[in-house]
Amino acid sequence: MTQKDEWLKIESLDMEAQGVAHNSEGKVVFVEGALPGEEVQVQVGKRKNQWEQASYVALRRESAQRVRPGCPHFGLHAGACGGCKMQHLEASAQVAIKQRVLEDNLAHLGKVKPERMLRPIEGPTWGYRFRARLSVRYVARKETVLVGFHERKSRYVADMNVCPVLPPHVSAMLVPLRGLIGRMQARDTLPQIELAIGDGVTALVLRHLEPLSDGDLAHLRAFAAEHGVQWWLQPKGPDTVHLLDDDGPELGYSLPEFGLRMPFKPTDFTQVNHQINTVLVGRALRLLDAQPDERVIDWFCGLGNFTLPIATRARQVLGVEGSEALVQRSRQNAQRNGLADKTSFEARNLFEIAPDDLVAFGQADKWLVDPPREGAFALAKALADLQASPRPDWTPPRRIVYVSCNPATLARDAGLLVHVAGYRCTAAGAVNMFPHTAHVESMAVFELPPA
């Protein structure tokens, strides 16, 4: 048991940006807010047989990488916002830690060591968040409205006036949004506002649990005119989202390197950080190195974020995605960008894919894989099974570029690709898509050795 007056030496940071130490008994102690190299006294909040969780109450030997947080709502204090976890750590040190998390996961979970570590992809550390889901709560006893992220370890909405990771014009809108909701009759039944920003368009999706009155609609229109936003309404599930007024500009983002524009709906999956996405797509395409005579499959293709850039380089690209709505959007985007003849799309549950499915999809020279947090285990296993029992009518892709938003599932799949399917992991690197959070995005390259 950690003693109150015991000084703990912080050895590393874990996936949740907690300091990791060992007490005098050798037990692991996770310390919120502490950084590697620091010595702290702690207050233990949770005890288990193998570990303790604590927050620090005294600090000596402060880390040279400790910085003043850029947001007044960040910290360990009561009511602190839970949206960010690393604002107390210098930005480039955050990236180094994420790169180490990636390497550690690959080594320990997948038993894989990349032949080359790619330089991390970095971008702006503030004002980068072009997508966000903001919770809304009317607090009747205080006659106030809260709009923002949840408090740390709580279901309560943080009392936020600014958010520096949101673009400045959206951060400046938080207080006016509180006033808007407070004026609306339906303020008790408006649980959420979803933000989606495209090129020159800021869309706000209002989830409403009851029909809105004419007066409330008038409030929304006045707010839109004053703040230059586009309101969308969501009475039920995501498929019910519609524009408040139909004459607004189209929501979309550009990939200038490839001469592409990607229209999307505000509830479609798009990357949170547009600047990083632009760099990420460029690097993925260079690593894939698709040639004019090659066929490529883009698994978990979404609305075509990688498929269409690949189509500007390859002979033919198949995009496969679980959502029928996104497949439709991909087809429309291919048509709009003049790439319909070089692309095809299919909706398929990729968490249940089998070797026969891979054979049916046909041979491809290269794959791009960009799964959600659950990873692409079924896909990797089907490929490994086909490698173990080859088919005369199918050959495996020579190269796979895997874009991941969860280093643990990437490491699991990498272990399968390397140790069972026979690929080499030739490169891997972190992508700082979400500065100040513990979220680790990454990419890895797998290649089949020559026969």
Image: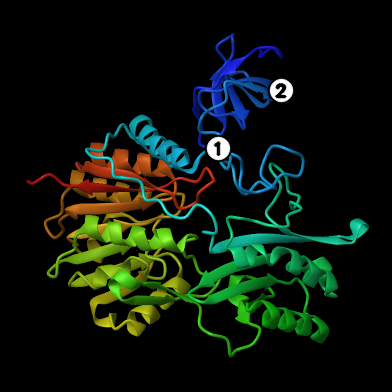
The numbered mark at residue 43 is: 2
The quarter of the image holding the N terminus is top right
**Three-letter code, disc 2:** Gln
Based on the displayed image, in which of its 4 quarters is residue 206 positioned? bottom right
Taking 281 as reference, is 219 above or below it? below
Pick out the residue farthest to the left.
451
Can you tell which quarter of the image residue 333 is in? bottom left
Residue 308 makes an appearance in the image:
no
Residue 369's spot in the image, x, y percent?
A: 33, 56
Element at label 2: strand
What residue would you read off at disc 1? 16
Q: Is residue 400 visible?
A: yes
N-terminal of the pair, mark 2 or mark 1, is 1
Within the image, what quadrant is residue 230 found in? bottom right
- The amino acid type, in three-letter code, at marker 1 is Glu
Disc 1 crowd rating (10 Å Cα; few below 14, some 14-19, many 20+) is: few
Q: Position of residue 311 (x, y in %)?
A: 25, 72
Label 2 crowd (10 A; few <14 / some 14-19 / many >=20): some
Which one is nearer the viewer's eye here, 442 or 112?
Answer: 442
Identify the element where label 1 is drawn.
Answer: loop
Count of marks, rendered view? 2
The answer for how far apart the CA atoms under marks 2 and 1 are is 18 Å
| Residue at 39% across, 81% down | 332
Which residue shows up at 56% across the image and 41% down it? 86
Kindly give the residue lying farthest to the right in the view shown.
141
Residue 196 place in picture, x, y as percent? 56, 69
